[in-house]
Amino acid sequence: MFSAYLNTLVPIVFTFLLRNAKKVKKRGVPVDVGGEPGYTIRNSRFPSPVETSWEDITTLAELFEQACKEHSDKPFLGTRKLVSREVEVTVDVRSFEKLHLGEYEWLTYAKTFEAMCSFASGLNQLGHKKEERVAIFADTREEWFIALQACFRCNVTVFICIFREEALCHSLNETEVTTVICGNKELKKLNSISGQLDTVKRVICIDDEFPTSASGRWTITSFADVESVVVQIQLILIYLFQLMLQL
């Protein structure tokens, strides 16, 4: 009988001792950010903010700008344009689409930075406000990266939309997105659920050809037009300046 009690008691005692001997891990360190006190989640050995190896660089936008200045003439974004499509049928009578792509065409760091600045300015001119949110709903490509960096530069909250169609409506409404940047095929999905989207005001389509809005609930502008807004403004200013000189 004593042996049975001993066999039961010993594991309980060891478990209790080991549990108390464990060091309690800190999940975060106190941080004062205004408002209610809270914790920041980082290694408890380093209570100070994360330091950077780049002097005076505190944001992703600043880091990208510095990289573009240092490597201005180097190739950065490469794109292979679509040459043709063809459908091939396998032995088991399955068909798949085969794409033929051209050679890589490169944008240098400097040209990418220039395009990003133009798009950022065009986004503001389009009416997107700083406190509003942007969603990028497209395959990864040159314009995808330019749009992302433009949002960083404008200090605009950007949401990368990777959800399936059934979750798309919920994700856009929950994040209260007002501007969606997408491709042609993604725009068709947006049109199909347009009646369920509460906050979307404007759509920027990466492709030059795109369907019009089925519901008229938002404006649709091409990516190229948003980039060219700055150029158009500059031309208008030059024209007005020339008129002033003639007076």
Image (cartoon, grey):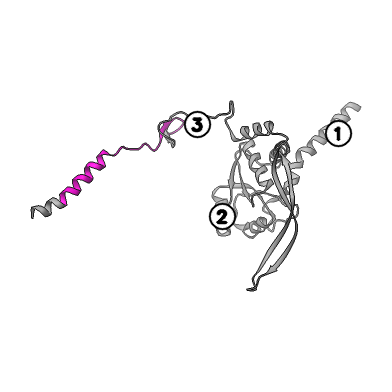
Write down the residue under mark 3: 50
Residue 32 lies in the magenta stretch: yes
Q: Quadrant of the C terminus?
A: top right
- Name the kind of residue labelled 1 in the image: Tyr
- Using the numbered discs, state the Cα–Cα distance from disc 3 to disc 1 in whole angstroms: 48 Å
Q: Nearer the viewer, mark 1 or mark 2?
A: 2
Image position of 10 (left or right of 47): left
Give the SS element for disc 2: loop
Q: Which residue is mark 1?
A: 239
Label annotation for residue 154: none
Q: CA distance from mark 3 to mark 2?
A: 31 Å
Which stretch appears magenta? 8-36
Between disc 3 and disc 1, whose residue precedes?
Answer: 3
Which of 73 and 181 lies nearest the eye of the viewer?
73
Residue extending farthest front: 91
In magenta stretch: residue 140: no
Look at label 3 and name its amino acid. Val
Name the foreground residue: 244 vs 208. 208
